Each structure stands twice: as C-alpha cells, then as structure tokens.
Image (spheres, grey):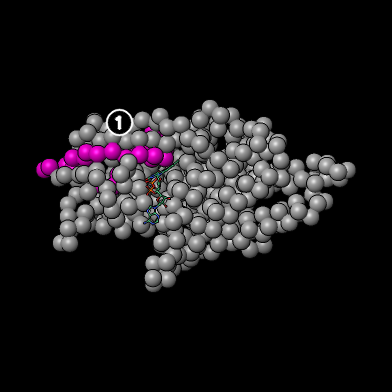
Amino acid sequence: MDFSLTKEQQMIKEMVRDFAEKEIAPYAAKWDEEAHFPLHVFRKMGELGLLGLPFPEEYGGAGGDTISYAIAVEEIGRACGGTGLSYAAAVSLGASPIYYFGTEEQKQTWLVPMAKGETLGAFGLTEPNAGSDAGGTRTTAVLDGDEYVINGEKCWITNAQYARQVIVTAVTGKDARGKNIITALIVPTDSLGFTIRSNYDKMGVRASNTCELVFENVRVPKENVLGDPQKGFNQFLYTLDGGRISIAALAVGIAQAAFEKALQYAKERIQFGQPISKFQAIQFKLADMAMEIELARNMVYKAAWLKDQGKSFTKEASFAKLFASEMGFRVCNQAIQIHGGYGYMKEYGVERHLRDIKLMEIGEGTSEIQRLVIARQLGC
Ligand SMILES: Cc1cc2nc3c(=O)[nH]c(=O)nc-3n(C[C@H](O)[C@H](O)[C@H](O)COP(=O)(O)OP(=O)(O)OC[C@H]3O[C@@H](n4cnc5c(N)ncnc54)[C@H](O)[C@@H]3O)c2cc1C
C-alpha cells in the first residue's frame, strides 16, 4: 500500500497494474522479438481513459493529475518498456503540446480524439543533424499565401506511423540576433509529400514504433501553427520538461520489473546448499536496488506534484529523469548479475529490461543534457 497516494491515485495504480499484467506483460517478449507495435492495446488503453488521463474531461480526458499519469506510465513500463515508451510519447509529446499551446479549435480537432484514444499523435523535433542541439534544426517552413510549405527530415520519431498528425518543429526565419526562429506546426500524416518510414532495427523498446519523416513541399494551412510562431523553441522546452517526468516514471517501472525478477530468482536459486538470497553480497545488491527505485519514484512524484501545483518543475523533472534513468540502468544490470548466466539468456526476460532502459539515458535529453539543464537551474 502506497500510503502517500490519494484514493484516486491508488485506484489508478491498481487498475493499470491489473490491465498491464493481463494485456501487456504476457506478450512483451514476443513484441520485443518481432518488433511489433501493439496497436490493439492502445485502443484498449483509450477505452480505459488512459490516453487522456491528465487532460480535463471537456477535452475528452479523464481529469487526472500528473502523479496519476506517472503511475500509469510506471505500471505500463513495468510490463513492457516499448509499450510504456509509446504510451508516454503519445500523451506527453503527441497530445500535451496541443493542450498546453493549442487554440480551442485545435484542441477540439486534434486533442479530443487523442484523449479519447481514437487517434495517436507524435512529436517531431530530432533531425539527423540536430539532436541535443535542437536550435540547429534544418527543416524549414516557408509561408506561401495562407499555407506553410515544409521541407526537411526528422529521425527517430515515436508513434509517427500510427499517428493522425505530427507536431513538427521547423525554422521559419531569423531573429534580430541572427538565430533561427523555430515554429511548431501540426502536420496531418496524410499530407501530400509527407513520407513516414519505420525501418530502424532497435536495441530495445522494440514494441515502440520509431520513424523517419521526410517532408517534400508539404503544405499545411497557417492555422496549423501551434502556439506562438516565434516561441516554438520555448514551447518544446516546456513540453520536454513534462515529458521527462514520464521518462523517469518509465525508468522506475522497468527497474521495478527487473528488481522483482531478481528478488524472486534470488530466493529460488540454490548454490552452496542455500538460496543465493541468503548471501550477504546478494542481499546488499537487492537492498540497494529497492532503495534506489523508491528514491527515484519519490523524485518522480515530487516533480509531478510541482507541475500539478503550477510551480516551476524544470530542475526537479531533470533530477528525476537523470537519476531514474541511471539508477534504472544500474538496477537492470544488477538484476542480470543476480541471475548469473541465466540472466544472459533471453528466456529469463531480464536482458530485455537492460536493453529497454538504456534509451531512458538518451531520449528526451541525454544524461549529459540533463546535467546541463540542472547546472543552468543552479545559476551556473
Ligand atoms: C527510440 C527513440 C525514440 C525517440 N523518440 C523521439 C521522438 O518521439 N521525438 C523526437 O523529437 N526525438 C525522439 N528521439 C530522439 C532523441 O530525443 C535524441 O536521440 C536525443 O535527444 C539525443 O540526440 P542525438 O541522438 O542526436 O545525440 P547527440 O545530440 O548527437 O549527442 C551525442 C552525444 O553527445 C552528447 N552531447 C551533445 N551535446 C552535448 C553538450 N552540449 N555537452 C555535453 N555532451 C553533449 C550527448 O549527451 C550524447 O552523449 C528518439 C530517439 C530514440 C533512440
């Protein structure tokens, strides 16, 4: 029992855990093996209100708070890292920017169907030559009459192949200091000249859909600009702050799964006439794993709580993302160590967690970028 959770948050935890254990966990190894995106699970998550969890009911959401959403990500991630990543990306990157910055009309057109789980959305920021340095975006959007004409490419965009629209960042001009002005545009995936390919062979999170996007004279009406056309850069920074809470929650969920397998295995595996859990070396590993997971979870809840209170949460979201992802990597690695040679075998399912969790140190700002963000918040 998590005494710190409200009744509603506890109910969500139980509901999502039950769903994930029945509908996701039994198939996670197969989806990983086949790099299969479980679209049907997203339909079911939509019916349960999970895809609109943190959005108000007036926009088709469930009116939950960010802590509830983080709990849902953790529980889905505990069952399958790839499904967890696609869930987190659908809510934090596909839908949230429209909720934060969209006009009423954009919310009705794009957010409501996503929140109801009828459609999925994606967020395309990263390019082959602009990753951490998103200011170096090369994709352009040029105003021609009442339409923007988009040219360029994006890489590693989650869920794009199954999305109805992608929020795309593009350079629309230069400011007084000669820096790129970056604007966010809502681009329907069936637009002429918009190609989406999913040919990547990934190390982990293989149930997640990851795409390359190519724009060749793609035209969108200027009404599809999201938020302030001059402030696309600041908008995605805010979006990523929120997204980092979900990546941290996902890392906690994956680490929790690896820890539970290691604990169970340690109690069952007999060496030198006793379960290996009786060896202090193994006990200390398990103790550290349990403690670090709990600490990371509390960091996630704190960042989520600050966001819900309307307070600044940039530093705490980076704290949580950085600590949870690096902690998760340590935990998954130790979980394999506790399994010995069996941990190295796919059959035991712990190696998948290590492959999945590695992405948490890279996506939505690498560990190095999180340290930069934190240092800036400290006034360095
Ligand atoms: C499976 C997957 C899904 C993804 N989903 C999405 C998505 O939905 N949408 C999206 O827009 N992007 C997505 N990404 C992209 C992801 O956000 C980027 O990979 C990430 O931001 C890092 O960019 P990069 O890979 O170009 O690395 P680079 O920026 O090239 O970094 C390479 C290395 O240099 C380090 N480095 C870079 N700059 C600095 C610096 N100033 N100081 C110190 N070290 C530095 C980095 O930390 C890293 O270790 C996804 C990526 C993957 C793999």
- Residue beneath disc 1: 195
**Picture residue at 27% right of the left edge, 50% below the top:** 136
Q: Position of residue 182 (x, y in %)?
A: 24, 52
Q: Is residue 206 located in the magenta-colored stretch of the structure?
A: no
Q: Given the current orientation, which residue lies at the most extreme bottom position?
A: 379
Q: Position of residue 96 (x, y in %)?
A: 40, 51
The span shown in magenta is: 144-170
Q: Given the current orientation, which residue lies at the most extreme left position?
A: 145
Q: Is residue 42 left or right of residue 3?
A: left
Q: Given the current orientation, which residue lies at the most extreme right position?
A: 273
Residue 242 visible at all: no
**Picture residue at 58% right of the left edge, 54% below the top:** 327
Residue 234 visible at all: yes
**Picture residue at 45% right of the left edge, 61% below the top:** 371
Identify which amino acid the numbered label 1 is placed on.
Answer: Thr
Which quadrant would the N terminus be assigned to in this image? bottom right
Q: Of residues 70 and 371, which is closer to you in this image?
A: 371
Q: Position of residue 106 (x, y in %)?
A: 30, 47
Q: Of residues 192 and 258, which is closer to you in this image?
A: 258
Q: Where is 38 relative to 332, above or below?
A: above
SS at circle 1? strand
